[in-house]
Amino acid sequence: MDESDGEAIAMATEAISVRVPARSAGHDLRAVKIVLHREMLRFVNDRTRMLSMLVQPVLWLFVMGTGLGSLVRGSIPGVDYRTFMYPGMISMTVIMTAMFSAGSIVWDREFGFLREMLVAPVSRSAIVVGKCLGGAVVAVGQGVVIVAMAGLVGVPYAPGLIVTLLLEMFLAAFTITAFGVTLAARMKNMQTFFGLMQMAIMPMMFLSGAMFPLANLPSWLHVLTVVNPMTYAVDPMRQAVFAYLDVPAVAEAVLNPGVRWFGDFRVPVVLELGIVAGLGAVLLGVAVLQFRKAE
């Protein structure tokens, strides 16, 4: 090999060298913003998904709520049963939307986009945070549609109530999205994710008090509702709604008893929200660890 050949090899080596920018907090924040923006665009452009996410809670609220209300009419004076179910339907809308948003990770893996994100010069925690924030924002946007139906079930359009519900929806949606991301981080196909999602979410939803009061439950059912973390997302919304209603004390005691520990201790709303926030932080950490182990 002569000197000219060595120079040619050196030039070729320099030509194909790639300089990867160093990771920084600025890059991570930009990654969070990009992932968040992508989730919002994906949801806005999928109108079929937007409508399908609303069908189930609307059916539960106006069809099932009317049917059940006809059974309890007279036993709970002064309150439409749909008014009682309203906070639960907000929760159902937010939770289902958040889980579907988290499930898009599986699609990204199948089509190769997830691999491109994982090799980007940003921390994987930034990708997870962006995903959870995107899912939460999308879920709250979907929940706003149900909030707009408040007047149809006798709930006032009070600014304080709307702001409270928006904040509680975001907290619940972020936690559920983190839970969904944790489940989806290692899954290979959507069928498995949807099956596991239904197995996890539906029992939690039925045991959260979203569709029936928590008062006077059998002891075994009361235990299941207390240990169900989703209960602590639904109950603050119900308490927020009932704070703006003028209902008889008897109906309040039956429909809005709150979550009770050890028989008589009614769990404060602040503690309930703290439980949801703490669980969300733990699940976010688990999701980050799952992504660090992913391919």
Image (tube, helix red, strand yellow):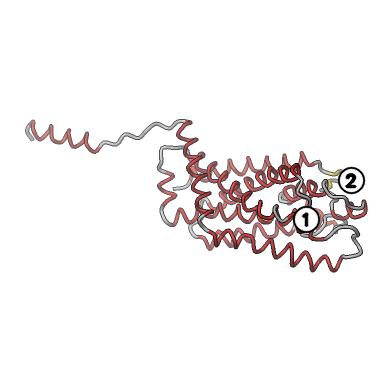
Q: Residues within 10 Å of mark 2 (few under 14, many from 20)?
A: few
Q: Secondary structure at mark 2?
A: loop
> What kind of residue is marked 1?
Gly
Q: Residue at x 83, y 65 (%)?
A: 69
Residue 114 in the figure: left or right of residue 16: right
- Residue 244 location (% of width, % of height): 82, 47
Residue 67 placed where, x, y %?
A: 79, 69
Quarter of the image where the N terminus is located: top left
Q: What residue is shown with label 2?
A: 264
Q: What secondary structure is found at the residue carrying circle 1?
A: loop
In screen coordinates, is 29 left or right of 272? left
Identify the residue shown where x is 26% and y is 36%.
Answer: 17
The residue tagged 1 is 209
Name the spot of residue 14 as percent of width and height, x first: 22, 34
Instruction: Tell me the mark number nearer the camera, choosing from 2 and 1.
Output: 1
The answer to whether residue 139 is left or right of residue 258 is left
Query: Which tag, 2 or 1, sits closer to the chain's start?
Result: 1
Give the answer, above or below, for where 58 lies relative to 258.
below
- Where is residue 194? Give x, y as percent: 57, 61
> At x 53% / y 49%, what residue is drawn?
40
